[in-house]
Amino acid sequence: MASAEIAPLLSSVQLGPLALRNRVFMSALTRNRSVPTNVPNDVNLEYYQQRAKSAGLIITEGVLITPQGSEWPHAPGLWSKEQVSAWKKITDAVHKEGSFIFAQIWHLGRVSHPDAPEQKLAGVPVYGPSAITARGGKFRFLPGHPGYVTPTAIDDPTVLLDLFEQAAVNAKEAGFDGVELHGANGYLVHQFLDSTSNLRTDSWGGSIANRAKFGLLALERLIKVFGKDRVGVKLSPGAGYNDVGMPVEETIETFGYFITEADKLGIAYFDVMRYTDMMNPTIDGKKRGVPHDTVAAYGHLTKNAKFFSNAGWSPEEAASAVKDGKVEGVFFGTLWISHPDLAKRLEHGKPLDNPIDFTTLYGKYYASEEAQKKGYVDYPEAQY
Ligand code: PHB
């Protein structure tokens, strides 16, 4: 039996038209296992199916909206018919298990790798809002650092908005329950929002409203396809990762504006990450991120949307925040990686005792199917 302490996290919640069975959500998690190309495979299907047996809501790993804008050799995409059919198998399997799944639609902007196979296939340069190189971090499996090339400032950002809209059309065809705009972690949407990566002097840069415009218009495009109550957005005001971050007052003003305006659009939810040290690299000898309490700073701003949080929550802490009305649900990442039955374990009071193997987090470039499965679909369930 679940302890009384955990019970609030296990209560059901309505998300637009969807009745979620609990608030133990699975966060988007890069696993880099869509081999040999960017099409989801049967091992990916098994991974999502295992977790759909108990998760209230699943957000896919970041799904590339176009060959342009990649870092990962084996991140799945959503631009071809083949990808749509492959995702359909996964969404069907998730629904059979009684769960729901949103596609996290993702464009990496200036931190795309110029030599990633997908980027080469696209035949267009690495785009960003401005020609400003990102510092810090390292690409995994491909040599170089984010900001390997100075991005080409995109002339007309509506070209990129069209790609988000087309990805949503494809997501709908693939049977997803909704889409989550990846507005976090220094990727394209965040690059427009942040005044250190966006130095544009046209209507897409400068004032907070101008910097917020790209993300808000992207949300409008997704709403056009899915309806407002099937669209969410992920944000990371604590910044750092991929060389973004503004002074704290400017951060609170910028994200406060974005959340208030996105809430007016009527979207279903915000996934607002907490500040964590893990996502805050030291760049040129200084921590780049902006530590602040993102639940306290932004939670009170939503009038329509559900306010969810993410990053470093324990189930006990999450249950207590739900009970106190601070958040309406919580996304878990690493706990879902090593416990395919995470929510079921919480329901039955089972320990979360599978250690996570960080060496297998991302899979291996061109590895065998066995290597793809290791640390992915072979974490055991508890005994019931
Ligand atoms: C990562 O792969 O490390 C990664 C990807 C997307 C994120 C954050 C981290 O939002």
Image (cartoon, helix red, strand yellow):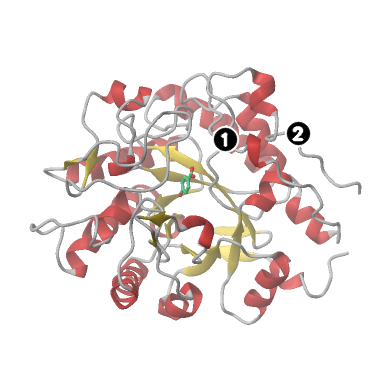
Q: Nearer the viewer, residue 367 or 99?
A: 367
Residue 191 % position (x, y): 28, 53
Is 349 situated above or below 226? below
Three-letter residue code for mark 1: Tyr
Give left or right: position of 199 versus 359. Answer: left
Q: CA distance from mark 1 to mark 2?
A: 14 Å
Is 130 situated above or below 119? below
Q: Callout 2: few (<14), some (14-19), or many (20+) C-alpha neighbours within 10 Å?
A: few
Residue 217 in sight from this viewpoint: no
Q: Residue 378 shows which numbered tag?
A: 2
Residue 163 % position (x, y): 28, 39
Name the front one of labels 1 and 2: 1
Q: Nearer the viewer, residue 62 or 54?
A: 62
Residue 68 % position (x, y): 30, 32
Residue 334 % position (x, y): 64, 50
Question: What residue do we see at 66% from left, 36% from top?
Answer: 47
Question: What residue do we see at 13% from left, 44% from top?
Answer: 156
